[in-house]
Amino acid sequence: MRVFVAGATGALGSNLVPLLVAAGHEVVGTSRSAAGLPALSAAGATGVIMDGLDADSVLRAVTDTQPDVIVHQLTALATMSGNPKYFDRDFAVTNRLRTEGTGNLLAAARAAGVTRFLAQGYIGWPNERSGGWVKTEDDPLTVDPGREARQSLQALRYLERAVTEAPGIDGLVLRYGSFYGPGQAASRTGTMGEMIRRRRFPLVGGGTGVWSFIHIADAAAATAAAVERGAPGVYNIVDDEPARVSQWLPYLAEQLGAKPPMRLPAWLARPMMGELGVAMMTSVRGSSNAKATRELGWTPRYATWREGFRTGIG
C-alpha cells in the first residue's frame, strides 16, 4: 500500500517510517521544510514539504501522491516547558494541528478517495478520574481536566469525533500513553529526565495518580499494525502495567542515576503545578491495552515500564 505519513519527521513518525518501509509499503512522508527531506529519503520514503495548517498545501500533497492510507502524526512538541501549569500554552500549536490540521487532512482524504485514516491521540490525564483506576476505550473521558488543559481536551475530543465519524472513511484514533525512550521527554536527555535529575519533578501527595507508558518504538509498531488491520474506532496504545506515580517515579529516578524525588503536599504543589499538575500526581487513571493487543495483533516489546526504564530509556 501507499501510506502517507503526515508528520513523518516527528518523534513517532521518524520511528514509524522505517517500519512501514520494511513491511513493503510505499511511504510518502511530510516535512514542514526541505531540511527534513534527506532523513526521509535515507529511511526509504518519498519526502514532500507540507504545512498541516495550510489547507491548500495539504490538499496538494495528498492529491499529488494518491495514498491508500493517511497516518496523521502532526504535532508541535519540540519546545515544552515541562510545567503542567502552562499546558494549554505549550500545546497551542498542537491543538491547532489536532483541529484545523485534522480537518485539512480529512478534506484531502475525501478529495483523493482515501478510505483509511489513522490519527495520533493521547490517553492518561484525559481519562475520567473516578471509579476504577484502569480505564478501557469504553469508559468516558473527564468532563473537566483542570483549567490548564481545557483547550487541549477540546482538541482531543474534536480529533476523535472528526476521525471516527468521517463519512466514507475508516477512521482509527490511537490513544498513545506517555512516551519514553530515546529522544522523548522521559529519557536521559529529555525534559522530564532533566527535571528528575535536578529534583524538580516532585512526588506530590501520596503519588496515587496512575500513569500508562509506552516506549516510542512500541508506539510506532502498534501504528504500523493499525495501517493494515483494526476496525474503525479508538485504541489505547499503552504497555501492560499501569502504575502509580509513587511506584514509577522513584524507579525512574534510580535508573537515571538521580536522587529520590522530593515530596510535596498537594496544597504546596498546586500554586507551582496548577490543578492539572496535582491531578497528574494524585488522581489520573491508567489505561488498558487489551483491545489493541486483541484487534491489532500487537504486543509491546517492552511489556512494562519497569523493563523499559531499565533497558530502553535512551
Image: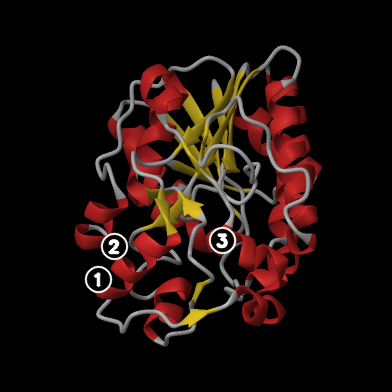
Between residues 160 and 137, which one lies in front from this camera angle?
Answer: 137
Q: Residues within 10 Å of mark 2 (few under 14, many from 20)?
A: many
Q: Which numbered disc, 2 or 1, marks the residue that appears first in the sequence? A: 1
Mark 1 or 3: in front is 3
Label 2 to label 3: alpha-carbon separation: 24 Å
Give the x, y percent position of residue 303. 27, 41
Quadrant in which the C terminus is drawn: bottom left
In contact (CB < 8 Å): disc 2 and disc 1: yes
Quote the CA–CA distance across marks 2 and 1.
9 Å
Q: Amino acid at mark 3?
A: Thr
Residue 5 in the figure: left or right of residue 154: left
Q: Of discs 2 and 1, which sits in the foreground?
A: 1
Mark 1, residue position? 255
Type of the residue with mark 2:
Ile
Between marks 2 and 3 in the image, the one whose residue lies nearer the viewer: 3
Mark-to-mark CA distance, 1 and 3: 23 Å
Name the quadrant containing residue 283: bottom right
Give the image location of residue 32, x and y in percent: 62, 56
- Indicate the quadrant where residue 199 lies: bottom left
Please give the name of the residue rendered at 78% of the width and 36% of the height, measured from the top-left corner: 103
Q: Which mark is residue 313?
A: 2
Secondary-structure class at tag 1: helix
Three-letter amino acid code at the position of disc 1: Gln
Residue that sits furthest to the bottom in the current view: 198
Is residue 308 at least partly visible in the picture?
yes
CB under 8 Å between callouts 2 and 3? Answer: no
Q: Which mark is residue 282?
A: 3
Which image quadrant: the N terminus? top left
Taking depth in this image into account, of 127 and 16 the one nearest to the observer is 127
